[in-house]
Image (spheres, helix red, strand yellow):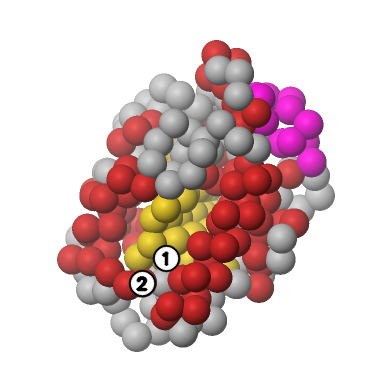
Amino acid sequence: MRTRISSWLLAATVAVATVAVAPTPAHAMTYTPSSNPILFVHGWNSSASTWNTMIGRFQTDGWPSSRLRAFSYNTSQSNATTAQQVSQEIDRLLAGTGATKVDVVTHSMGGLSSRYYLKNLGGGSKVDRWVSLGGPNHGTSSANLCFSTACTEMRVGSTFLATLNSGDETPGVPAYGTWRSNCDGVIDPVDSTVLAGAANVLSGCVAHNSLQNDATIYAQVRDFVNP
């Protein structure tokens, strides 16, 4: 486990082997001048608007809107193609804020393109902390029901995932955190989200499309990206 991971989250990671993480107290952390800007990457068949609730909570906790960026992309295309867009969006966010690094918060399939960026496109030098909410990091049986390039890449045993997960699953200097729920209903198996070398958190009973809107998960993510 990387030493840069917050001590509270490290303790939570050990605890969630058998139980869900206890709620983090509301407003334990707030924005400071040293807080990184954040890029939000949505998942399959979604859009930037899925982040409205979480972005609103970050703003309530002091993050300026100029340091919170979500974008929409074609969720049928290869995650490798989307990774190029992630790279462009991160460069725009860095240029617009003058920051040297960003944090990346992802939902579902958004974790795959951003991981591709970190591993293959030099993103490790520009990202401080990376978050996956219900990511199909080792595949999901749900992807067997759709047939776009992105869907085939999300299938268990796909060539894309085998390559992405080869060697170090959490490469470089960024701190990695994942959140999963036994009530997800979309990521099957649920533990697909877990990455070796990450802080892997088992949340309470939260459905897949509510992970990015859950108040407890928000507080934990906020504290993870703002240690």
Residue 80 coordinates in the image, percent (x, y): 68, 45
Q: Residues within 10 Å of mark 1 (few under 14, many from 20)?
A: many
Q: Is residue 87 magenta?
A: no
Q: Residue at x 56, y 56 (%)?
A: 86
Q: Image height check: is 32 above or below 57?
A: below
Q: Residue at x 41, y 22 (%)?
A: 185
Check the picture and name the quadrant holding the N terminus.
Answer: bottom right
Q: Is residue 157 magenta?
A: yes
Q: Residue at x 50, y 76 (%)?
A: 94
Mark 1 to mark 2 CA distance (whole Å): 6 Å
The mark that comes first in sequence, 1 or 2, is 1
**The one of 105 and 200 positioned closer to us in this rendering:** 105
Q: Which residues are magenta?
A: 152-163
Q: Residue furthest top?
A: 145
Check the picture and name the quadrant holding the C terminus.
Answer: bottom left
Residue 154 found in image quarter: top right
Q: For residue 38, which numbered disc appears in the image?
A: 1
CB under 8 Å between discs 1 and 2: yes
SS of the residue under disc 2:
helix
Residue 155 coordinates in the image, percent (x, y): 65, 24
